[in-house]
Image: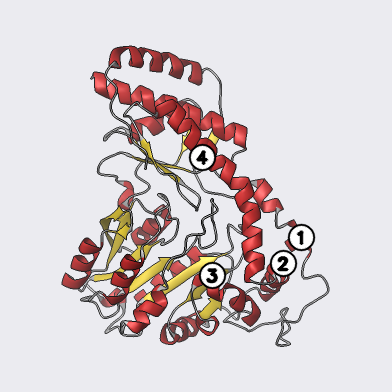
Amino acid sequence: MTTEPIHADTAGLLARARQDYQDLAGRGLSLDLTRGKPAPEQLDLSEDLLSLPGGRHTAADGTDVRNYGGLQGLPELREIFAGLLQVPAAQLLAAGNSSLELMHDCLVHALLSVMPGAKARWADEERIVFLCPVPGYDRHFALCERFGIEMVAVPMTADGPDMDTVERLAAEDPAVKGIWCVPKYSNPDGTCYSDATVARLAAMPTAAPDFRIFWDNAYAAHHLTDERVEIADLLGAAAEAGHPDRVFVFGSTSKMTAAGAGVAFFGSSPANVKWLLANNAKRSIGPDKVNQLRHVMFLRDAEGVRAHMERHRALLQPKFEAVARILQQELGGTGLAKWTSPKGGYFVTLEVPDGCAKEVVRRAAEAGIVLTPAGATHPYGKDPRDAVIRIAPSYPGLKELEQAIEGLAVCVRLVGYERQAA
């Protein structure tokens, strides 16, 4: 994360920032950086997917994909993604288009049915608590709020969540039933969990026998540089440490192919897979196997996935480089901001002086630049420092993105210098 010392000549800088903001507000901009959606050009990379499977309607094992059944998903698709998600194909499910839906269902099933290793349904417990590394993914937090699950924030470090805190909380309170993790190119700060962090998550004692790690590997193949960061295999490490049922792995093709028509995956121990399949059998007679077959035909194999993601990188990397360049150009040396330079994923985290994030977002909105609400990166939408802003560079065109980041920098300078001058 880049940071700079505080500049001394506040009065003159504030006057200039006010003029820059007045000019910005007069431009009539309408720019949106709220969500990390693939741009239309990225979606076009999978245009051929829409013409598949053509006249073919049988899977490799002869299954007619047009018919009911196959709750675990096509074996050939699970083989393609097994290595990428670090889950044996026999322990991997291919489902519908949304990994968030799978996370939702796992919470619902845990509330309403007894999980492997559990003494009771979560709904029968007095309290359910989840640990939430921050900054983190707002939709994870929204799921907890939806089901009345108490959230406890855990600070992120360069190696992942603060494991001293995680280990202490998990060991001392049986109400702590889980932790949210985005282990590679984490949303929103790009953190990649170290091998030591993975080993500690796998082996740590927990007061709850049914403690679960929701391992949301959403950006497993979403590299932005020549370095392809790899993380340790948590599912395997947990099994070796004597906790085979501890890990729920999630992933999807949502930011690979068609974001609204991809395939989501769940991986875990054989006992957990059996548990989820039994519960899912009550709500579905099988996933969209036609869509799964078209993904098999389009991606072909694991190397096909990697090649496809390199085409995504070619479109995304210039945008992330533009964000870094403009932030350095406009805010470097001001002492008003620090920001991440992720090696993958979909977001940049911008930190402004404490107490300023909401005001920066408000000023930006008034100037026609819509950002993710300040606080969304924390449980209950409350950033105690009011300092973190999530930037989503993927969707706008490069020119629009540059305008938005330049405008955001103006707002940071204005609010920051106003705070210094107060």
Q: Residue at x 52, y 31 (%)?
A: 404
Kindly identify which residue carries mark 3.
84
Mark 3 and mark 4: Cα distance apart in space: 29 Å
x then y, percent, for residue 268: 44, 79
N-term mark: 3 or 4 = 4
Closer to the camera: disc 3 or disc 2?
A: 3
N-term mark: 3 or 1 = 1
Horizontal relation, residue 306 to residue 410: left or right: right
Kindly identify which residue carries mark 4.
33
Kindly identify which residue carries mark 1.
48
Q: Residue at x 20, y 76 (%)?
A: 207
x then y, percent, for residue 303: 64, 68
Residue 57: numbered disc: none
Task: Using the image as rendered, state which of residue 331 and residue 63 is in the foreground.
Answer: 331
Kindly identify which residue carries mark 2.
298
Mark 4 and mark 2: Cα distance apart in space: 30 Å
In this rendering, is residue 205 above or below 395? below
Residue at the outermost left position: 172
Tell me the quadrant of the picture where the N terminus can be found: top left
Closer to the camera: disc 4 or disc 2?
A: 2
In this rendering, is residue 76 above or below 356? below
N-term mark: 3 or 2 = 3
What kind of element bears circle 4?
strand
Closer to the camera: disc 3 or disc 4?
A: 3
Q: Residue at x 38, y 47 (%)?
A: 376
N-term mark: 1 or 4 = 4
Given contact means CB atoms under 8 Å apart, are the residues at marks 2 and 1 in contact? yes
| Label 1: how many Cα within 10 Å (few below 14, some 14–19, many 20+) | few
Mark 1 and mark 4: Cα distance apart in space: 28 Å
Task: Using the image as rendered, state which of residue 156 and residue 283 is in the foreground.
Answer: 156
Q: Residue at x 58, y 60 (%)?
A: 254
The quadrant holding residue 66 is bottom right
